[in-house]
Amino acid sequence: MLERIPAGQVTVNYRALVGDRVFFVKQYWNTETDLAAEREAIEQTRLAGLHGVPVAGVLPSIRGDTIVRQGGITVSVWTWKDGETVDDGLDPAQQRAAGRALGSIHTGFAGHPASFGPSAKLDRWLHPDIAELDATAGELQEIAGRRRRRDAFDEQALRTLAERRAVLHRVPELLSELPHLTAQVLHGDYSPVNLLFQGDELTAVLDFLPPDPFLIAYELGRIAFDPRTVVLDEDWIASGTNLVSAYVQTNPKVRADDITACARVALLQLMTSLYGVRQHYLRPGLLQADLDRFWLLRHAASQRLLTGLGDVESALARVAHHR
């Protein structure tokens, strides 16, 4: 029996019952999906498991294939992992579990051959086109402002876009103050939506991406200072540093600069992204209401991070130098 469950970006997902056994099935519905890259991502999952990270295991076909295409249907089959995602902020024990797992991933992936190659993605990230960002934000403002009957989101968009444009000039300065940071192969999408918990136990890390070197500080800052934590948790600096301290337990060789810069990198990612509001006015998605809320959450997080950056970097420096 197949039971459809929430889908990924390139898959339709199912819970499959076969006798008394339960499996997770990914169906790759998009004919343009890069299956070679998906196989690389599966290998990353396997590698993480070898380093003690809780992951779902892929079940190969009798020919040893991890992804099978037959009769126009393309699938991979995985062991089932019980657990749920947390969408309202991780509690302290969950923060520590997420930090330790990420440390194990980074330790395990540090020697990956791709970690020593160039990264066009990183080069683009370090050199954002601020003029283009400002122009796009202005275009979105014009679209919202021209509407005869503005709804609540239109008013929020006008306010938040104006606030974003007012601070874009600070991005080059924030970038220029970054130290030299470590780039290597990462999970690629380490966020609460890809972590399964049973209570405080992390039962699985999901959806690894193909190997592509990027900043350790990016992936650490993204989970430690997730917008849900920054906005919903009044003691968000302590929560973020709690996760970072646990991360260091399983990646003790991480450089101090990568630790102290992770909040700044998370802030820069938020400040240079219009994800959610761009879709609302230029190309609405199927779950646009969720994207609208995500834009507002991420914008609020960017403001709070920017205001508290000095305090959070001081707290991170204490973590880095008292390992």
Image (cartoon, helix red, strand yellow):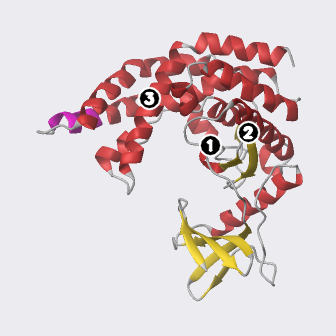
Earlier along the polypeptide chain: callout 3 or callout 2?
Answer: 2
- Span shown in magenta: 140-146
On screen, residue 126 versus residue 110, left or right, reads left
Q: Secondary structure at mark 3?
A: helix
Main SS category, magenta section = helix
Report x, y in % for residue 314: 69, 11
Report, in whole angstroms, how far the alpha carbon at label 3 lies from the one at label 2.
24 Å
* Contact between labelled residues 1 and 2, with CB atoms less than 8 Å apart: yes
The numbered dot on residue 120 is none
The residue under label 3 is 299
Q: Looking at the image, which residue is at 82% across and 49% down? A: 53
Q: Residues within 10 Å of mark 2 (few under 14, many from 20)?
A: many
- Residue bearing the label numbered 2: 98
Query: From the viewer's perspective, is residue 258 above or below residue 284?
Result: above
Residue 177 is situated, as x and y percent measured from the top left of the image, at 63, 16
Q: Residue 121, image x and y in percent?
A: 61, 43
Which secondary structure lies at badge 1? Answer: helix
38 shown above or below 187: below
